[in-house]
Image: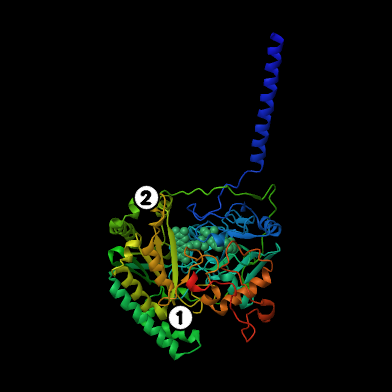
Amino acid sequence: MAKRAMRVIVARRKQIVFLLGVFFLGLFAKVANAEHPRDASNFQGKHPCARGVRSSTPKSVRDVSEIVRQSESVRANGAGHSWHPGLYCPARGGTRVDLLNVRSVESSTRWILDERARVVRADAGLLTRDLLDGLASRGYTLPAFPWFIDQTIGGAVATASHGSSLRAGSLSSQLVAVTVVLADGSVEHYAETKTSPALFESLRANVGRLGVVVDVSLRVVENSRITRNNEDIAPDAFVVEMFHVQAATRACAKQYPDDLKAQWSCAMSKPEVRALDETQYFWYTPLQEMSRITFQREKPGALNFTAYDERSASSALSSVNFGSLSSGSLVRDSPPRARDITSPVTLMGSEGMASAWARTWKRATLLNIAPVTDEQRDSFLSMTEEQYLLHERYGYEQLEVAVPFTKAGDCMQAFKTALYDDRELNLGFRSQALLRFIQPESAWLSPAHGRLGTLYINIEDFVKYSRVFDTLGNPRFDAAVAILRGDKCDGRLHWGKFGFPKRGCFDGAKEYGVSFCHFGCQVSRLDPTNKFLGDSDALQFSGIDFAACCGADGLFVENTTCKCVLNDRIPADQC
Ligand SMILES: Cc1cc2nc3c(=O)[nH]c(=O)nc-3n(C[C@H](O)[C@H](O)[C@H](O)COP(=O)(O)OP(=O)(O)OC[C@H]3O[C@@H](n4cnc5c(N)ncnc54)[C@H](O)[C@@H]3O)c2cc1C
């Protein structure tokens, strides 16, 4: 009897040891091939990529090259500060390439400044804030920069991110050189003065479609002193100002037909247009109040740029630092679920509270816009780190459209009327709209491309995520967006933000005309297998025969057989 009991105990022990062995082996296997620490979604854990998307954290350009070479579908990822998953997610089973730790620039600071050339070269994965603070310590800054500076500098360039400037433009216009890992894993460095315009204008606002950018070189200016002022302005008065801008630019367009350069110098000779340079407006929509923020430079000539010639610049600005290949597995599974860092705030949804929220936001913003004379880095508007931390609390979508100056009056009139007429669209807003101005831009995919000055209007939807289960959405906000995207405004969407329509409904060829196909010519050359297409059809060029229609200069040639028209888009009335 005792012997039998002993045998049972021994057998049980063996069983337990075996099970423990299996458990620890499993655990070991899991740790050895651990999931990637960052989920595949945006900064708030919203808009996740499809299941099966893999993630990588390369450290060197050689790592990036190896990952790109081995993967069939790749999308570069910066800090995730955007809203279009189709553009930051690769196709299912593809790989996100996280740029945050990639060292391309040979410097412990991750950037190198050539003071004589007035150019800084920075790792694409460096945060804009860190670059600005580093430059300020050397007495320099970027000529103009976004309100938000916690994105990567490579991500900001990729999507034509911008502040407000009619002379320096978006960060894409400030780009003078770039290093890219191409679809076959090769690494190329392109400089403004040594690269065909067809290609460089594609690289400026590349939206990740041409490859993985590992470093960018940008113009810098002295961090000189600027006085910031603000004043209250009524929405009615603002609309009148926009009508003046519309009339002035329409007159210039008429005076110099088919010559955008002459039209723009005509426009900049008009005080009502010039007054918008560096100016920004906050529109506290539910309050029917606005602030105008203006800047006065102590050195007005600070933005006179000379052409950048890389041949006479320091060799550190052009030599590529490949680094070494990291050991171990570079590509890992993404966590199966996105971590949503926000939670619903029911009070945010209440229309009765719209004004109270807007007042709270305005009070906070008045600190950002208070009159001051300081160096440009601090005088220009930017979100503080404390304000950034609030992103952990309130979930939202941010959407921005680029409206041509030639429609600015009609558009703002329509927007204002809809906000305050009997539909009361203002009740769909909580935070203020931010309005900024950009000159005509050369980058094919800059929303300011080919237009005689652009009014950017940035709006946010905090209502959608205020409910635990949302079935209602925010119809008032959606109606306001329809106006900004409609005929009155012709607003083009910011590539890094919310609002892209469902598959088949975004027609880049209609929105951008032939410049969309100039970009397409470079895509067909550099990415023939569509490795960088991503999980969206926004930058897919169906039905266009680039082999037959791209000229020797790399530009799309329109003629009777070559038309920049996509053949797979859903008619607008079904979208
Ligand atoms: C709170 C907030 C405020 C914002 N304010 C502004 C503003 O004031 N002005 C403005 O213009 N924009 C603003 N943005 C938009 C933001 O600048 C863009 O979405 C920017 O692209 C985000 O950069 P990221 O590094 O987070 O890139 P991600 O969000 O990771 O990627 C955005 C896009 O860029 C591509 N990309 C990123 N890195 C690279 C790379 N190295 N090579 C190739 N492609 C790359 C990605 O593939 C993707 O298509 C704001 C965003 C947020 C979240």
Identify whether 73 is placed above or below 252. Answer: above
Q: Is residue 27 above or below residue 108?
A: above
Q: Quadrant of residue 16?
A: top right
Query: Which mark, by number, is residue 7?
Result: none
| Count of numbered tags | 2
Q: Residue furthest top?
A: 1
Badge 2 density bin: few <14, some 14–19, many ≥20, Cα 10 Å? some
Q: Amino acid under label 1?
A: Leu
Depth order, front residue of 274/570: 570
**As drawn, is 246 to the left or to the right of 60?**
left
Residue 138 appears in the figure:
no
Q: Residue at x 49, y 60 (%)?
A: 83
Amino acid type, label 2: Val
Specify the label residue 345 is tagged with: 2
Instruction: Measuring from the top left, give residue 345's x and y in whole percent.
Output: 37, 50
Task: Categorize mark 1 by other alpha carbons within 10 Å: few (<14), some (14-19), many (20+).
Answer: many
Instruction: Work out whether residue 111 or residue 401 is closer to the camera in this orientation and state it.
Output: 401
Instruction: Say which element carries label 1.
Output: loop
Q: Is mark 1 within 8 Å of ligand 1?
A: no
Decide which of tag 2 and tag 1 comes sooner along the chain. Answer: 2
Q: In this rendering, does residue 20 appear at all?
A: yes
Residue depth check, mark 2 versus mark 1: number of the one nearer the observer: 2
Looking at the image, residue 487 sits to the left or right of residue 31; the answer is left
Instruction: Kindly indicate the quadrant of the structure image that contains residue 406.
Output: bottom left
Q: Quadrant of the N terminus?
A: top right
- State how far apart marks 2 and 1 are (Cα): 41 Å
Question: Which secondary structure, mark 2?
Answer: loop
Q: Return the x and y of residue 418 as percentages of the image width and height.
A: 33, 70
Q: Position of residue 324 (x, y in %)?
A: 70, 53
Residue 547 position by quadrant: bottom right
The disc label shown at residue 452, or none: 1
Front-most of residues 466 and 177: 466
